[in-house]
Structures are given as structure tokens and as C-alpha cells.
Amino acid sequence: MFDFDRVIERRGTHASKWDNMARLSGIEAADAIPMWVADMDFAAPPGVTEALMAESRRGVHGYYADTGSWAAALVDWLRRRHALSVDPAWVSATPGIVAGLGLILQAVSEPGDKVVVFPPAYHAFRRIILANERRILDAELVQRNGRYELPLDALRAQLTPRTKVVFFCSPHNPGGTVWTAAEIRALAAFCAEHDLILVSDEIHGDLIFAGAKHTPTLSAAPEIADRLITCVAATKTFNLAGAHVGACITSNAALKRRLDARIMASGLGSYNSFGMLTTEAAWRTGEPWLEALLPYLTASRDLFEAGIAAAVPGARAMPLAATYLAWVDFSATGLSPEEVAARVKGRARIFASPGSQFGPGGESWLRFNFATPRSLLEEALGRLDAAFGDLRQGRK
């Protein structure tokens, strides 16, 4: 029913993934392959397209009103997909998760306060914290048994009275770790012990591979609901990043009032009708599409992990339990991060996300987005094989 092998030409369509590549990477080649930003190259679910076509045929595109059906669609999705019970009254719509994170910071902290981040972590965490004149408190993740673990004991010694908020990426981006319920409960207890607001970014929570299970933080630790804000969206799951619609969820009425006040003060209480319609349609109609997508991504993940190990002696992809973002460590190749980047960009003509932008612990890594038609992924692996071929022959 869904053709994920279909190559859709995106150049010249205002697609940031493709049209910003040369400016951001310096790769000028016409055949460059973008494997950086978390944006899939697949057509959205048919129900989304139908919703857009219906709106287009209507021909009148005025202000959007009443988020009730949108919130109901989200609540139903969380119940069906994650057995999570949420009251629609707990939901605040925001123009994307990153904007929501900034609004949360404004609602619960002051300039100069510290925000805990577990790097290497989603790079926009760092950007939005600094843009809001807060300070980053890095608690670097620990690698053990092929996955990341939370460094709570080390973090305890780093806390100060100005530490107010924790940003938690669940599932983890870029490592693809799916946290266990026990790990989430330990973090929740830590936040309660130290009077911290926990912000759980669960935007990748639907993109889980077989053998793993995403546990919403609210499900794992309902006892800290009064200090928890969960951020979710349809945009990563269904490839609707351009919709710029996210949801922040909290059962703490006072906390929600503070967040909603920041939304109104920022002039963001009026919503993009196209974004609201498409994300609602995705939650209501997109499940068969997602069920078809996940096996396709699984095969692509396996192909990429095997391909990068064969192409680059010493390279290791962290075993990926979630997302479509391969996290590859090049530290054992004998090459510097600069030399690795030069080969990937210069020889292979591939733009991957530099690991350094994810903070401490990411310096020797690159993040590769493999959510693209299989033919393009195979082309990328062939180029990487050629770019590092001399290493396999014992030369640099």
C-alpha cells in the first residue's frame, strides 16, 4: 500500500534537508546526499494528503479555531499506541517542540538558571537554552553494553541552587537508546528529591524497533506528575516537520497556566490551520502507514549498520532501538574527527550531522539519517565504502 522505495525529487522545493545542504555543509556537488536533519524522504500517510486536499478545495483559509478535535485525536493516539491516559485539558499546542521547550523555560525558570542536559543529546536543547539566557549543566551519558545510561550519581555533585530544569530525551537522540521504566523512575525520583522540573521530550516515541518498548515518563512515574511536562508531536512519526505543531502535556493545572500565559504573551495562541489539520489527520488515519514504515526502517537500519562496519575499519554504530538516526563512532579508525568529516563530505559527498553539535561525548561521532529510499541508502553506502577504501588496505 505504501511505496517507501519511491524517490521523490525534493531539490528546489524549499526542503531544508536538500536545499540548505550546500550552504551548511560546503558540499557543492549536484549529487550530494543529505543524511543530516531528522526529516524522512517518504510521502506522508494518504490521510494527511487527503486532509490537505480537502482544505485546498474549500478555498477559504482563515484563522483556525477550537483545538478540541485535535487534542482528542492526540489523546486517542496516546491511549492506543502507548496505553497512556491523558486528559485533553492537560494539552497545550505549541509551534513545534523546540518552541515549546523555550516557552517552558520562560514559564518555570529565570535567566541565569541552569538546565540539565544529558549529552550527547539533541542539539536544539543547547540552542534553545542559551537563546533564553539560561545556562547548560552537562551530565555526560555513560556508555555501557552498547547503550547509554544516565549519570545520576555524578549529576548530584554538580547541582547548584540555580539548577531548575532537566531536559530528558526519550527515546534518546542521537543514540537511539530506549530507556527502561526503572531508569525513568530513577530520574523522576532524582528530580523530586532535588525539586527539579522534568521536561520529557518524547517526539521519537512512536519510532520504536521490534524488541524495544517506549515507556512514557508519565506512565513510569505518575507520582511526579506535578513536576513533569511531556512533549510529543506527530511531526517526526509521520514526516510532517513542516507543520510546526507540537504538544506540551502536564496535569499540574498551575504549571499549565504558567505555560499557557507564556504562549499568549508570545502571540502564539493562534494556530497554523494546515499544521493542526495535518497532524490531527495523521493521528487519526496514519497507523497503518506507521506499521508499514517500521519494518522498512528496520531493514534500512540493519543495512546501514552492517555497511558502515564493512566500509570503515574501526567504525561502530551504536545499536539502535529507536529513531531513524544512526549514531556512529569513528574513534577507533585512527583518523581525527576532521579527517573523518573530510572523507564523508569531500570524498563521499554525504552530509551527516557532526557529533560535536550534540555536546560533550559526541566529538568522534557522526549521525546519519537513513530514512530515505533504499536505492539512495545503497548509493550512500557505496560512496562511504570508496571513501574509506584505503583504510581497509592498511593505508591512510
Image: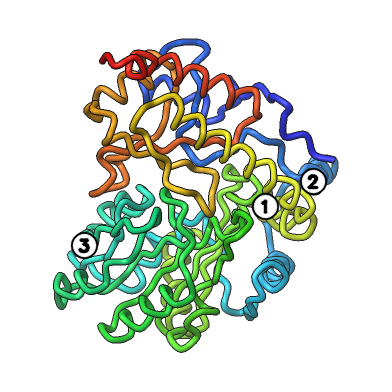
Residue lying at 30% horizontally and 78% vertically, measured from the top left: 196
Q: Residues within 10 Å of mark 2 (few under 14, many from 20)?
A: some
Q: Which labelled disc corresponds to residue 55?
A: 2
State which mark lies toward you, 1 or 3: 3
| Circles 2 and 1 in contact, beta carbons < 8 Å | yes
- Residue closer to the observer: 61 or 332: 332
- Residue closer to the observer: 192 or 211: 211
Q: Which labelled disc corresponds to residue 137?
A: 3
Give the spatial CA distance, label 3 vs label 2. Answer: 45 Å
Q: Amino acid at mark 2?
A: Glu
Residue lying at 63% horizontally and 56% vertically, measured from the top left: 210
Q: Is residue 8 visible?
A: yes
Q: Amino acid at mark 1?
A: Ser
Q: Quadrant of residue 208?
A: bottom right
Element type at marker 3?
strand
Q: Which labelled disc corresponds to residue 273?
A: 1
Q: Position of residue 69 (x, y in %)?
A: 74, 67
Query: How many numbered circles does the render carry?
Result: 3
Residue lying at 58% horizontally and 58% vertically, measured from the top left: 233
- Answer above or below: position of 208 versus 359: below
Where's the C terminus, which quadrant?
Answer: top left
Where's the N terminus, which quadrant?
Answer: top right
Q: Which labelled disc corresponds to residue 176?
A: none
Q: Is residue 151 left or right of residue 60?
A: left
